[in-house]
Image: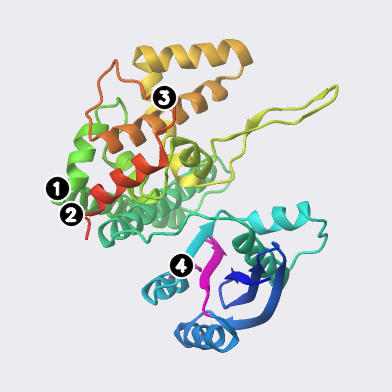
Amino acid sequence: MSNLKYSIGIDVSKKDFHCCLSVIDTEQAVKIKSTHKFANSTSGFKLLTEWVRRNMKEDLAVFCVMEATGVYHEQLAWYLYDKDFSISILLPNKAKKYLQANGAKSKNDKIDARGLAQIGAEKKLDLWMPPSRKLYDLRSCTRQHQSLSEMHTAINNQLEAITYSQFQSKDIIRQMKKTMRLLEQQIDEMDKIIEKIVKEDEVLNLHYQNISQIKGLAMLSFAVIAAETNGFALFKDARSLVSYAGYDVVENQSGNHVGRTKISKKGNSRIRRILHMPVLCAVRDDQPQFKKLYERVYKRTGIKMKGYVAVQKKILIMAYYLWRKKQKYQTDFNYPEKIIAPEQAEATHDKISKEKFH
């Protein structure tokens, strides 16, 4: 009996991260070799690599597994990638669900790290590829744009509430209006920065010209989708993209009980948020394939939002195939029913990666 590979489960929080080093043998038995907690800082990253070397008794492949925790995992992921570690990044709560399926009832950072290590040991996971610098900058800008928009909306709602109150402070109203004007100016500036990033890059601009032909999918919508998906480089098929964006369907049915069927929303909410307005435009302007899909779902469910969500999902998948094929959207375009083969997707991604993103 011999060991096959090492797996390091890493549960990251703002200030520190817990690690669990496990090894799996030819009989599929997973054994924990060591656990440790490190500071989420450069010094902690260096101590992690020393800890790994110290506890590795065999020359085996090492795989690191962590969950996407906002932005707190990113510095560590980049550090390990630069050190030539193989890294897989999972959607949140994967470790929790995996351990629950195996009978675990408690949850803490140490247990989550152990669960991630076990997942990495027992499963063949897709390796993480860091965003290109261009897309990373674009993602920072689109997220800043969203933050500014949300602040503007919040202040606008407060201002509206004040104007209907019994006693109104002119000083507060004047200050809030001033803040709103400043935010509007900053949003306009961010719009220009995002447009500059996209149009000055030959590859991004090509995809923008192709995909933005979909009615309602303008510069900001395209930029968010491109940035949050890393140019679709992380996805071997449309199914994984749908799951990443939280559009995968969750059923609640057992025996005679039929519960509510809904999308999981366990994914990137920024994509779902930015697709809301384009879908309203697509349905309102009577684009046949979108309008028919909306009406079909609405007729079946009686819920307008389900119809809009179905169109959101369709537009996202269309953007995926248009990007892969470098094809301009036409009103009669439809994506294939079958998912493209993983090797074809990888070949396409390799070609795209070499074009101009770095």
Is 328 situated left or right of 225 in this image? left
Q: Give the residue drawn at x 65%, y 68%.
A: 24
Q: Amino acid at mark 2?
A: Lys
Magenta stretch: includes residue 319: no
User: Residue 238, located in which quarter of the rendered image?
Assistant: top left
* Residue bearing the label numbered 4: 86
- Residue located 52% across and 21% down the image: 307
Q: Mark 1, residues whose alpha carbon is within 10 Å: few (<14), some, or many (≥20)?
A: few
- Disc 4 versus disc 3: nearer the observer: 4
- Would you name the residue on which mark 3 appears? 280
Say if residue 165 shows up in the picture: yes
> Where does label 2 land, which residue?
356
The numbered mark, 2 or 1, whose residue comes first in the sequence reads 1
Label 1 or label 3, whichever lies nearer to me, is 1
Q: Amino acid at mark 3?
A: Leu
Residue contact at pointers 1 and 4, CB within 8 angstroms: no
Q: Residues within 10 Å of mark 3 (few under 14, many from 20)?
A: some
For label 1, the residue is 202
Asked if marks 1 and 3 touch (Cβ < 8 Å), the reply is no
User: Which is nearer the N-term, disc 3 or disc 2?
Assistant: 3
Mark closer to the observer (3, 2): 2
Answer yes or no: do the residues labelled 2 and 1 have beta carbons within 8 Å?
Answer: yes
Q: Quadrant of the N terminus?
A: bottom right
Q: Is residue 249 left or right of residue 181?
A: right
Q: Secondary structure at mark 3?
A: helix
* Residue 94, position as x, y percentages in the image: 64, 54
Alpha carbon separation for disc pair 1 and 4: 30 Å
